[in-house]
Amino acid sequence: MKKVAILVSALALGVSQPALAQEPAPDFSALTTAMGEMFKAEPLTAEQQARVPQAEEVVAQLFPAGTYRKMMDQMVGPMMDGIMGSIQNVPLADLARLGGVDESALAAMGDAKLGELSAILDPAYEERNRIMGQVSVDMVTRLMDRIEPGYRAGLARAYASRFTAAELSDLKQFFATPTGSRYAAESMLIYADPQVMSAMNEMMPAMFEMMPGMME
């Protein structure tokens, strides 16, 4: 979920700057190679490998096909709206201060917001960002559809390595109960619940508060 949030945040920052859309597409091959080498899993032992079919049954209940798409529907759209709203409400003086503008010049900026400047320089920015935001959400959703089978396979290997055969059997029996079935169906989707995502509202103010120290 953290990776999804980071990806969405990066997309939101990108759509807030229409000028970037005019630049040639960058070559991410080196970055892709580096990221591919970042996480290396140890091969499963023979005993763990033997538990994979049992773990797959558990994962099928916890993470059935289409779970990522449901999470995207609940999370990405509202997250994009929230991030874009936060970015457009950033005071220009705060951005200028991060860029090293003299304090005497900051006072002249008053309470002007980034969104106000955007409206002057690019009157169509709101409509453009709305369209680009929707395209970004659609692209992320398609990406999630593409990687979901591999993610589910990884979950099965993780469960096979972390739980014994007896524990996997207990989980399967629990998921067969009414409460267990309800829990299994909601266990991943709950991370996209508005109650959880609303806590993310603290991210942007905290990030901008830390930014001066990070710049130093």
Image (cartoon, grey):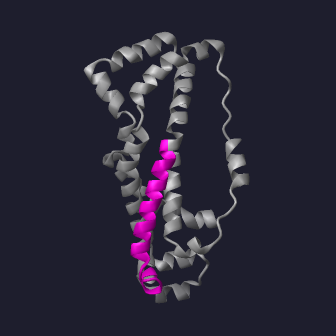
Say which of 195 and 131 sits in front: 131
Quadrant of the snapshot with the C terminus: bottom right
Could you tell me which residue is drawn at 58 percent across and 72 percent down?
A: 20
Position above or below: 141 against 20? above
Answer left or right for 75 relative to 11: left
x and y, in percent, of residue 193 in the image: 33, 45
Say which of 99 and 175 sits in front: 175
Q: Residue furthest left?
A: 178
Q: How many marks?
A: 0
Answer left or right for 161 relative to 120: right
Position above or below: 5 against 126? above
Asked whether residue 150 is in view, the answer is yes
x and y, in percent, of residue 145 in the image: 48, 43
Say which of 209 and 139 sits in front: 139
x and y, in percent, of residue 95 in the image: 53, 75
In the rendered image, residue 171 lying in the magenta stretch gets the answer no
Q: Which residues are magenta?
A: 118-145
Could you tell me which residue is drawn at 68 percent across and 26 percent down?
A: 42
Could you tell me which residue is drawn at 53 percent across and 66 percent down?
A: 14
Position above or below: 155 against 133? above
Could you tell me which residue is drawn at 51 percent across and 65 percent down?
A: 13
Answer left or right for 19 relative to 38: left
Asked whether residue 1 is in view, the answer is no
Characterize the magenta stretch by its predominant secondary structure. Answer: helix
